[in-house]
């Protein structure tokens, strides 16, 4: 499963506020009591695998919403790059800019040599606890949405 992440299942998810492609900011703790949150850390905008991954989230967005889950893509790209990426590829989820790399570093996803996050997933439940994590060993791999949705279903539906 995962080695090297700073967050572990059962631990509180570190709170953060990041700029979002929706024009505002996203604060993780604001989702407590309302929705599960899937943080999908990705190496960079306009990368082929990242593009496929973010588009797949868009295609299955209704399933994530029905499962009571908000999905956010997190990268260290500038907000302007993420806005352009989202627009160019019709991405329907909000992308968060961790340009300072503080969140990626805090969650343990940052590859210090590449100065970009590894492709990783952190599922946070409605109570703000980390419930599942996964880091890809190869940047060319990604989890399929069916697997992510199966992990979400283990948390239970809307309450």
Image: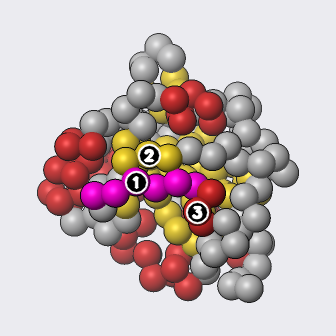
**Could you tell me residue 13's position as x and y percent?**
70, 48
Image vertical order of residue 144 relative to residue 115, above or below? below
Q: Give the residues drawn in magenta, as a range.
A: 23-28
Rendered image: mark on residue 25: 1
Image vertical order of residue 94 relative to residue 141, above or below? below
The residues tagged by marks 2 and 1 sit, at their Cα atoms, a distance apart of: 5 Å
Secondary structure found at label 3:
helix
In this figure, which residue is indicated by the disc labeled 2? 18
Residue 52 in view, yes or no: no
Q: Relative to residue 78, is residue 98 drawn left or right?
A: right
Image quarter in which the C terminus is found: bottom right
Image vertical order of residue 53 relative to residue 155, above or below? above
Label located before the other in sequence (2 or 1): 2
Q: Residue at x 52, y 68 (%)?
A: 70
**Could you tell me residue 95's position as x and y percent?**
37, 53
Image vertical order of residue 69 relative to residue 132, above or below? below
Tags 2 and 1 touching, CB below 8 Å: yes
In this figure, which residue is indicated by the disc labeled 3? 30
Other residues around mark 1 within 10 Å, as few (<14) / some (14–19) / many (≥20): some
Q: Residue at x 50, y 63 (%)?
A: 71
Q: Relative to residue 26, is residue 39 drawn left or right?
A: right
Q: Residue at x 58, y 62 (%)?
A: 30
């Amino acid at each position: 499963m995962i080695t090297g992440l700073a967050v572990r299942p059962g631990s509180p998810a570190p709170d953060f506020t990041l700029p979002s492609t929706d024009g505002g900011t996203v604060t993780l703790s604001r989702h407590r009591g309302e929705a599960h949150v899937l943080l999908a850390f990705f190496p960079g905008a306009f990368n082929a695998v990242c593009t496929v991954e973010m588009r797949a989230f868009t295609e299955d967005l209704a399933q994530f919403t029905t499962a009571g889950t908000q999905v956010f893509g997190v990268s260290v790209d500038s907000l302007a790059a993420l806005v352009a990426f989202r627009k160019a590829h019709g991405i329907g989820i909000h992308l968060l800019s961790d340009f300072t790399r503080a969140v990626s570093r805090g969650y343990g996803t940052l590859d210090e040599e590449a100065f970009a996050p590894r492709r990783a997933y952190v599922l946070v439940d409605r109570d703000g606890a980390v419930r599942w994590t996964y880091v890809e060993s190869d940047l060319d791999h990604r989890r399929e949405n069916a697997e992510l949705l199966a992990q979400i279903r283990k948390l239970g539906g809307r309450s």
